[in-house]
Image (cartoon, coloured by chain):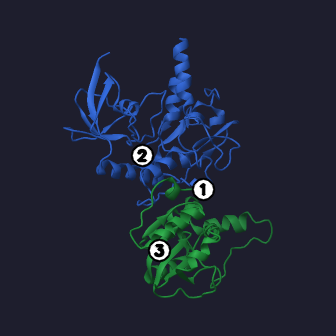
Chain colours: A green, B blue
Amino acid sequence: MNKLRLATVWLGGCSGCHMSFLDLDEWLFELAHHVDLVYSPLADVKEYPDRVDVALVEGAVANEDNLHLIRQVRERTRLLIAFGDCAVTGNVTALRNVLGDPETLLRTIYVEHADIAGQMPLAPGIVPRLLDRVYPVHKVVPVDVYLPGCPPPAQRIRALLEQVLAGGDIYLTGREMIKFG
Amino acid sequence: MAARTFTIDGQLISAREGETILQAARDHGIFIPTLCHLDGVSSVGACRLCLVEIEGSRMLRPACVTPVVEEMVVRTDTARLREYRRMIVELLFAERNHVCAVCVANGHCELQDLAVTVGMDHVRFDYTFPYCEVDISHPLFGIDHNRCVLCTRCVRVCDEVEGVHTWDVAGRGTDARVITDMRQPWGESHSCTSCGKCVLACPTGAIFRRGATVGEMERDRNKIAYIVAARDQRW
């Protein structure tokens, strides 16, 4: 049997969802029998590859790098899973949306509230520009499956991946699977 | 008191005259989701989550304020109702800034539970991200309007049980806010007795005890009905 080509993606999030993924502990060995991890912050791959079967996307779309990457991910992935509350709702990453435009926000934080050497964090080509608003993934590209949780507990991730590996329709329901927070 | 017999979801039900569909359903173990309803205070039919279908009526009726009628045929769990309920919960999430992960009520929230009940795995509507005030001028309690669903339980419990009416609603549409006294900071309210009944009644993390952090805001919402029952027996 061909192994599934799995990617995990880290957009505007705290990497807690990836930590929870690692909490699958020894089941990761079982998973490794069924998938090839072709792209991930946990693997040293620079370019998002073609023909990815499944992508777990952590984080909201918050800056231009996120936007560029998520469009590539959608183009090159069969099953895109919004992985965790930031990807599904914007969550903590989107808290800034109520505080106005990024320019004002950055000035307030990095200039006005700076203790020493306040300056605007401007480094074109190194620090990606913030988008005007933070978006949940499905507001930017179509999403196939939503896995809420901050972070989704390891057992929830496993239950989802087992459905993915089984191949049929994916159906998540009940407190164990879709509780936010 | 006269009895009324009718059916809910095909089940034959006997209820007292004047009872609501919601009361009768609960007495018979039939679940209808609610949010603004709170045992012990009056019902207002505001949240629309308890809408049910009644045969022969084109309109959907809120079960919490619709009295039972002889031989009525009620349906509580149709595809149309399920879709509307999910839509209502999604709109509530989109209307304010409900961030479960950093909320004092995480794990003890009726809105969070409803999202699970109606099968909400994401919100299809655009989030509005409104700017909302947080008032922590009261020495014991706080209100975070980001988390308010305008159920008016606080308004009703303060008026009907405490007999004070510190809380009310000001503004219209998306500008509507629960307010204390004449829209002054809660800590400057002259009428508030600091009884904490609004804290007990709140379904979300909007009204909270100061000092509670993420997930710590537990409350026993049944206490309101308990207080009302105890007082009725005494008087």
- Secondary structure beneath label 2: helix
Q: Position of residue A164 (x, y in %)?
A: 46, 72
Label 1 sits on residue: B101
Task: Determine which of the numbered discs, if any, sits on residue A37 in the image.
Answer: none
Q: Residues within 10 Å of mark 2 (few under 14, many from 20)?
A: few
Give left or right: position of B134 versus B19. Answer: right
Residue at point 41%, 59% (across, down): B125
Q: CA distance from mark 2 to mark 1?
A: 27 Å
Q: Is residue B55 above or below residue B214?
A: above
Mark 1, Cα crowd under 10 Å, few <14 / some 14-19 / many 20+, is many
Q: What amino acid is found at the position of numbered circle 2 in the picture?
A: Gly
Image location (x, y in percent) of residue B81 = 32, 47
State the CA–CA distance, disc 3 to disc 1: 29 Å
Which of the numbered marks, if any, corresponds to residue B173? 2
Q: Chain of mark 3?
A: A
Residue drawn at (60%, 56%), measured in percent from left and top?
A: B101
User: On the rendered structure, is B38 left or right of B208?
Assistant: left
Decide: few, some or many residues near mark 3? Use Cα within 10 Å; few <14, some 14-19, many ≥20. Answer: some
Q: Amino acid at mark 3?
A: Leu
Q: Is residue A84 above or below residue B108?
A: below
The residue labelled by disc 3 is A165
Locate residue B144, reporting x and y percent: 59, 45
CB of mark 3 within 8 Å of CB of mark 1?
no
Check whether the beta carbons of the residues at disc 2 and disc 3 lie within 8 A of each other: no
Decide if residue B121 is in sight here: yes
Q: Quadrant of residue A14?
A: bottom right
Residue type, label 1: Ala
Out of A14 and B144, give the one closest to the viewer: A14
- Given residues B41 and A178, the one toward you in this image is A178
